[in-house]
Amino acid sequence: MDFVFEILFEIIVEGSLEASLSRKVPLAVRILAGLLLVGVYGGLVGFIIYSALGSKNWIMFGAGILLLLFLSYGFYRIIKKRKKEGMS
């Protein structure tokens, strides 16, 4: 059962990432795919931070904040790259 969930999650995330970066997909669908990605990753990071605060585990809290920073930087780089490609 875990294998099925892993495959479904991978298909959703990878499909959303590809759809949000493709110029062939309509803008509204790209925006929804991007929002889905931000929601999935934001929810995961939020859950990690919330769980860490509930259990007073400061190492997990730090890992959650670090993950949030890495994801934010990754999204920033993708957006910056896409804007640069659009300007050329």
Image (spheres, rainbow, N blue to C red):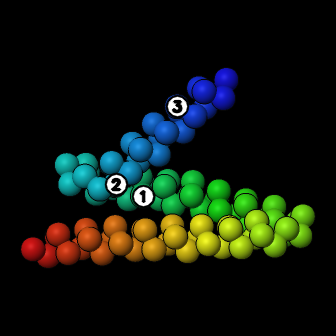
What residue does disc 1 label? Answer: 34
Looking at the image, which is closer to me, 30 or 57? 57
Which residue corresponds to the image point at 81% horizontal and 65% vertical from the top-left? Answer: 52
Where residue 29 sits in the image (x, y, percent)?
Answer: 35, 51
- Apparent side of residue 10 relative to residue 79 in the rendered image (left or right): right
Where residue 35 sits in the image (x, y, percent)?
Answer: 47, 59
Where residue 58 sits in the image (x, y, percent)?
Answer: 81, 73
* Mark identifier at residue 7: 3
Q: Is residue 19 above or below residue 84?
A: above
Q: Nearer the viewer, mark 2 or mark 3?
A: 3
- Apparent side of residue 10 relative to residue 60 in the rendered image (left or right): left
Q: Nearer the viewer, mark 1 or mark 3?
A: 3
Q: Earlier in the sequence, mark 2 or mark 1?
A: 2
Q: Residues within 10 Å of mark 3 (few under 14, many from 20)?
A: few
Q: Residue reaching furthest front?
A: 59
Three-letter residue code for mark 2: Ser
Label 2 with label 1: CB-CB less than 8 Å: yes
Distance in Å between CA atoms under marks 2 and 1:
5 Å
Q: Residues within 10 Å of mark 1 (few under 14, many from 20)?
A: many
* Mark identifier at residue 20: 2
Looking at the image, which is closer to me, 71 or 24? 71
The N terminus sits in image quarter: top right
Three-letter residue code for mark 3: Ile
Mark 3 falls on what kind of element?
helix
Q: Is residue 9 above or below residue 45?
A: above
Which residue corresponds to the image point at 60% horizontal and 27% vertical from the top-left? Answer: 3
Quarter of the figure with residue 84: bottom left
Mark 1 falls on what kind of element?
helix
